Image (cartoon, rainbow, N blue to C red):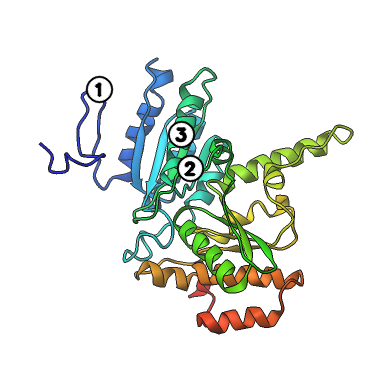
């Protein structure tokens, strides 16, 4: 009997499934997954493959195979574990992924998510199974990045399912007692720091924060670009409003993720405010603690607070001195080299 039998997720082997342990063989493992992902068409036997691996060793190592999966109309799930530039601490340049969502996003039928909470993963997988194996039988496959650090798992906000699937929903509002109202967006490993930043803004600066979880900036960008294209080609029809513009308000907005800035910057054209600032992990990974890595890449709660105050200063709600004082309070080294070039 497994030693972890008393746990909810104890180790067990099912007799109605199969586990392949490919070892350190990314190409062979991807080939095995692809064979199962095409079983519905090649063998008339639908199967639901899950390929679980270090996220850095997927699209970067076998990107051409992923393109092939799209070309062959594969169906299944790619689970990029230990994802993000800062979550797999101590592993350095080779293991720290901050760009796989950019690589996955260029494959038209690859649906990608960077969830923050377990309930988001559940909704996404349920939706994927329905889309790939339900009545409509869509020719898509899913890339989902998952984490390897302990974090709080709150209850799902009521009615959040649609927003999870589309890539953005309001998770909570943290009210401040002063002036100023911002929107904070986050995903994956950095969502916990977004929530911490909201508390600091409320307690220390009186600023109210609407905290949004953004499980997929890729899906948001695709939907927004599709609406833009439709509007261009139908000038006399009622114009479509991108989902991002429907959900967000005209308030200063900051997005912070464990991926390069280009990931969250994709939705800039659809954010209904001119004050939108993106934090990200541009640059090579390195071996250090999570706290030090997030300070290095300038994505932790302190940088989120400073970015939010900076956007408030641009609209005149606070002064630039408030921003400067916050930088001094948090001890940020303003003369350090850009992490991109460090």
Q: Nearer the viewer, residue 218 or 304?
A: 304
Q: Which residue is mark 1?
A: 16
Q: Nearer the viewer, residue 197 or 67?
A: 197
- Please indicate whether residue 47 sits to the left or right of residue 130 in the image: left
Image marks 3 and 2: residues in contact by CB distance under 8 Å:
no
Q: CA distance from mark 3 to mark 2?
A: 33 Å
Callout 1 secondary element: loop
| Among numbered discs 3 and 1, the one appearing first in the sequence | 1
Give the foreground label among 3 and 2: 2
Callout 2 secondary element: loop
User: x and y percent of residue 36 in the render?
Assistant: 35, 27
Q: Is residue 294 visible?
A: yes
Mark carried by residue 191? none
| Among numbered discs 1 and 2, the one appearing first in the sequence | 1
Q: Is residue 64 visible?
A: no
Q: Which residue is mark 3?
A: 69
User: x and y percent of residue 50 in the render?
Assistant: 36, 35
């Amino acid at each position: 009997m497994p030693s972890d039998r008393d746990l909810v997720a104890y180790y067990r082997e099912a007799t109605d499934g199969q586990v392949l342990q490919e070892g350190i063989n990314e190409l062979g493992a991807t080939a095995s997954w692809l064979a199962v992902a095409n079983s519905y068409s090649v063998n008339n036997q639908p199967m639901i493959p899950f390929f679980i691996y270090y996220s850095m060793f997927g699209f970067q190592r076998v990107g051409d195979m992923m393109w092939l999966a799209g070309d062959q109309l594969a169906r299944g799930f790619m689970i990029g574990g230990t994802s993000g530039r800062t979550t797999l601490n101590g592993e350095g340049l080779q293991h720290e992924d901050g760009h796989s969502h950019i690589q996955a996003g260029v494959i038209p039928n690859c649906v990608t998510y960077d969830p923050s909470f377990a309930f988001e993963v559940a909704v996404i997988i349920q939706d994927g199974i329905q889309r790939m194996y339900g009545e409509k039988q869509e020719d898509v496959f899913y890339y989902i990045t998952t984490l390897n650090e302990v974090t709080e798992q709150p209850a799902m906000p009521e009615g959040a399912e649609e927003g999870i699937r589309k890539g953005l929903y309001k998770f909570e509002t943290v009210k401040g007692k002063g002036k100023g109202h911002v929107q904070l967006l986050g995903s994956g490993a950095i969502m916990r720091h977004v929530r911490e930043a909201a508390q600091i803004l409320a307690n220390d600066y009186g600023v109210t924060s609407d905290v949004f979880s953004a499980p997929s900036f890729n899906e948001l960008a695709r939907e927004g670009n599709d609406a833009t294209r439709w509007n261009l080609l139908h000038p006399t029809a009622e114009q479509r409003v991108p989902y991002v513009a429907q959900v967000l308000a005209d308030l200063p907005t900051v997005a912070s993720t464990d991926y390069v800035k280009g990931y969250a910057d994709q939705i800039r054209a659809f954010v209904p405010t001119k004050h939108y600032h993106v934090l990200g992990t541009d640059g090579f990974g390195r071996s250090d603690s999570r706290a030090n890595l997030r300070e290095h890449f300038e994505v932790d709660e302190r940088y989120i607070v400073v970015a939010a105050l900076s956007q408030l200063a641009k609209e005149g709600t606070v002064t630039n001195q408030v921003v400067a004082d916050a930088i001094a309070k948090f001890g940020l080294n303003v003369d350090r080299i850009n992490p991109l070039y460090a």
